[in-house]
Image (spheres, grey):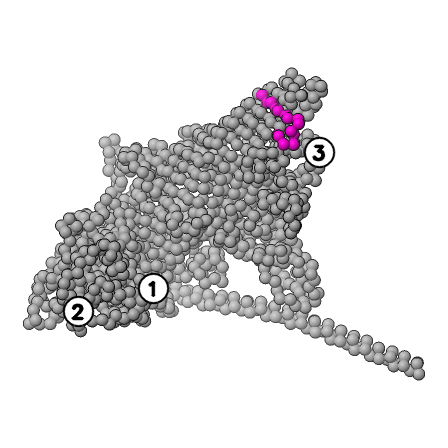
Amino acid sequence: MVTIIKNQLLKHLSRYTKNLSPEQISLSALRGSGELQDLTLDEDLLTDLLELPGWVRLTSAKCNRASFRIQWTKLKTVPIVLNLDEVHIALEVCAEPRVMNPNAAAAMPVPGKYSYIHKVIDGISVAVNHVQIDFNCDAFTSSVQISRVTVESRTPDGRKGDLRLTRIKSPDTGQLLIFKELEWQSARIEAKAHGAAAANLPPLRLLLGTTHCRIVIKKRLADCAVLGSRLVLRPEPLAWALTDGQLRAALACAAALAGPVHKATQLATRTKAAKKIEEPVQQIATRSSSSEKDILARMFARYDVRETSYHLLAPRIDLHLCDDPGLGRSEMPQLANGGALQVTLVSMQADLFPYHKASDDRRHWRGYREAATPHSQWLSQALSSFCGSLLDLLDPRPLTPSAKPNSNSERSEESLPNGVSHKQSAPQTAAPTAPSTQTTSQASPTRTRILQQLGKLMTTCLVLRIDDFTVYKVSTGSKAREAPRPLVSAEKATLPGDAGLLHAELTFFYYPGDVCFPVPSPKLYVQVSPVRVNVDVPSVVWLAAFLPHVAAAIATESTNDSSSYMDVRTECIMPKIVLEAGPEHISQQRDRPKELQVCTARATFTNVRESARSNTAGTRADLASIISTLRRLAPRGQFPCSGDDMDPIHQQFVLHADSLDDIDRGSAVTPELLWRENRSIWCARVEPLWIDFCGARATNYKPSPLLDATPLTAWMCFEDGFNKIWVIGRTCGLTGLQINHYQLLFLLRQLEKLSELTAWLSHQAGRMPEEPGTIVAGIVVPAVEVTLVLPTHCPGQESSRDLDSVPLDSSSLQDLKMGSESTMAPSMLDRDSGVLATHSMPECGYPLSQSIEVCSALPLPAEELPPPSPGLGFSSFSSMRRGLTSLVTSIDSALTRDEGRSDAASTASSDSERYVVVGLAAESPLDADMAFREFEQGRTCNSGVEMAAEVVERSSSPSDHSITSSCKRRDLISTCTWRLNNIYLVQQSVPGKSTLRLTADDLKSDECASIPWDEFQSKFSMRARAWNEPAVSDEDTKLRDLPRVAARLVRIELPKELNEKGEPTGLAPFEELLEAQIRDLNMSLNMSTALALSEFIEDEVIVPPMPLEVLISNLKLHLVEDRPTRSISSPPPQPLDLDLTTLRLTRDAKGIVHLGPPVIETSRPQSPPELKDARQEIDRLNRENEELRKRMATMDRIAEDNRELRAIAGEATVLRQCAHAAQQEAANLLADKQELLEALRLMKEQLSLTSRGKR
């Protein structure tokens, strides 16, 4: 009997093995056990039977020992166990997709109905002790060692159980679900790249821990065909450490596999999709009874595999990146010994759906929230646009009217916006139907065939979701052991409970089978939820050295083909860039912030243009408007431009704005037929952008604005990859900024860090073998108002409770109609506890209608006083502060004023400890609390203001918390606002040199002597709403006069210093020069503001002076003496008028300031006739340019009129068609009427004849 069984095994196994003999088989039939030794499998046959991917071929497969165990009496409940000891497999990569062996079909069993034997085979459990897989490719070789591999049948919830519980059969559709689980304890992956490009790359080694893989297989009972499957891979938390060499080796291996995998996958997907689309879709019928079939149907629907999908669920991945010596390691002293960067991903999920129909919804995708993903709407709009363009291109003929009424069968299917027919069972995705009429529109046969083909459109979609990720700052060996600090982290507090941090989708389109028909372009959508990015100089420099060195491995392996055509849209929701204070932070300075936050509600980066109908940024019309504004404001051949400056308006921008850069795809019907729009122009939108200071004690650690919310739009194009970058952009509306002295000090220290960062980035770019890059960025700002928050020179001048009576801090608010206190913003902060004394301020110099209670903070203890400032700085400008103070003092002496300011003014400072606080008149803390509450609710407090008779102590006890929390920050400040209009700003960075150019049409100032801090903040937020951008007239488009304010900052790198070996080392030194021209300005300024400005620009550190040259022409300055007089008998103060016709101010590298007339440069000798001819030629060219601009404006208007006429003509055509159809219908009705009348006449005649015959 054993011999018979052996012969039967040999008969079946010989088709799959090589040289199998009876001596290799040992059996025990009664025990149900057996063993096979030294099995060598037929690799060619198994390659096709196992349906391996077409890009790989099995070259060898061996097993040293295989044993099995069969429990004959429990085959229904206990699986057959197959144990394999060691399995050795060899694979190789196919350069071209593999063709299936025709002999493999003969070896496959004939499909039949699912029976008992199939249940036994599907329930087999396999256990392998060790698996060795050797992988060979032209670019690399690798090996994978896996230990303790098991494949078992599981219940739907993943538990071990009876075999009968590991299957679910549908009682209605004739389908079966089989549940399996694959598990291994450990895996070791090693790869070694070879070739000339990878000669110095180290081997790659990765370790994987215990990994679980759940598999659900869907079969058809009629023929055992596999209809679909779901594979879910879930590894344990991973921790990998990779050097830049290992990462380059991994990327080189992946790049080598990309080509063969893409070819084979594309062919296999089309072939399998053709089979799947032919299978009828059977839906489970719902029942109201509670029978066993209904339970099975519900369970089957719960775990059903509607389409094949593959999933990766990684609970946590810790990736440690380390740099090797060489180009991948920065020369920054802090990073000279190397560094490491840690990236942590939490709950990462990657889903692949290779056979998804474009017209189907995604509600059955596990964990996918279709309604909460903006990508669904973006994809639907793109498909609708594609189908409309395709129909217009292939069948431009209008619809043919027909008098045939609609039937029920015709209304059973409707047309989706993307052109795909869809049944009415999904009304949420179908397009709205037309109202019912007697007539319908019948499409042409060509259009019908196009719609039928579009109905077969399928997609391959890859979805990546990450719940949380953190990138930590770079750590070095020189640092002491400390907890890692985040560089990029999630703002989990602002996320909904079930929202993920990152959602990315990559979608490819295709048609089943070998069909050559236009498809939509691939689409990539990325959405990032709130993240916080901390700017850390060592980390950014480390990444700038590490990433380009790693990316070079991909560049050497990639082909010379152009980059793939793809629609990309990236959205960042509420990102935040943070600049943190360093060790220079002084905690005693209450107004000094700890960090600067650059925030936005939404940032979008895309290469897809918005619809021309939408009146938003991101359209070609918006780009054309920015180009026009840049050209209008650009100084042509005048200062601050020079001969070697580059134009920020690249030719690609102009062609793209005029739709002249479309790609010519020809007229042949190809999949890329409609991929015509240029995707190399990118648009970035920030809606809106604002900047806040945070962490100051004076604001109770709450945000204080630096930049008011303003939208920003930027356009980018690239050359030579990303080596040359052009950027143009503009802001909309009024841009408002405010800053005080200590915030300025914070900004100066941050600018020093950013300067160090840019220097090291430039140094690293020079080390790379590629040509150094170029960046040219131009931006236009309609108007900017910069408000300098200064200490008030007259603390007794308190603003009225009526906001209309408060002098506005900016001229932009002149037309703003403000209500009462109900329009004021709520309190942003509470004052710190302290001792407040009340006194009157009669020497303020302003008439007061009634006595005012003024609370000023007493001097702080010695340990809390801020340290004295060194006295010089402000980025090399504040070294002039002493001279400016002396100048103002001398003017003050000439006007016989007191050299020392009043007591209150002398104690006033930009520091909040010495600000004066105006309190409400109240007799008790309860009265004060009630008064402040009424003020917050917009009710006027009419109680009298009295002189306080005692000192009021404010403590931080819980009993007084109500007073502290209800009190707004009412300390008085003065403001000086500077407004510039039509700012034109260009930043140009080329190897060895960088230039910043700025022009503005006008410069005006506005002052507010005294205003409460919270009232100023309320008005500051209303600036943009009260400002309207003036319309641009035809005169403004002409050649403009010289700008009234122009500046040019040039920074030139010098040769590096040489070390002992004669090699250049360290950062390259540089020299800077600031040039400015100010002309035709008429300004007025208070003397107190001038003195406050001299204190405002005072720096806390001494920095080397920056050379500068300022040319002033026709500047009129009106100085108003607003300080109190020395005595009552002194005469009233008189203003001082300064008229500077021409003045040249220079400062050299030593800090010496020179004042004198402008230097007249002698021009090169040139004959007068030539100069005259050149001027005439320039005038002629200017006139021609002006005429061309007028013609272009006329052409634009004509084009707009043509578009309107074409739209009207189209509407007229439709109306004519409708009228023609109505005429035909009327004619038909008249014909029917005539026929009915004729029939009626004949019937009457017959009736008359019949009546006569009867008579």
Name which quarter of the figure residue 78 lies in: top right
Q: List the residue tagged with mark 1.
A: 1024
Q: Position of residue 169 (x, y in %)?
A: 65, 41
Tell me which amino acid carries mark 1: Ala
Tell me which amino acid carries mark 2: Glu
Numbered badge on residue 110: 3
Q: List the residue tagged with mark 2.
A: 946
Q: Is the Cβ of the residue at disc 2 closer than 8 Å to that at disc 1?
A: no
Q: CA distance from mark 2 to mark 3?
A: 105 Å
347 with respect to 214 (left or right) = left
Q: Is the Cβ of the residue at disc 1 closer than 8 Å to that at disc 3?
A: no
Q: Residues within 10 Å of mark 2 (few under 14, many from 20)?
A: some
Q: Nearer the viewer, mark 1 or mark 3?
A: 3
Q: Which circle's residue, 2 or 3, is located before the other in the chain?
A: 3
Number of numbered discs overlaid on the protein picture: 3
1138 with respect to 521 (left or right) = left
Name which quarter of the figure residue 9 lies in: top right
Instruction: Name the residue at 43% across, 37% down.
Output: 317
Q: Residues within 10 Å of mark 3 (few under 14, many from 20)?
A: few
Tell me which amino acid carries mark 3: Val
Q: Position of residue 61 (x, y in %)?
A: 58, 25
| Residue 241 included in the magenta stretch of the image | no
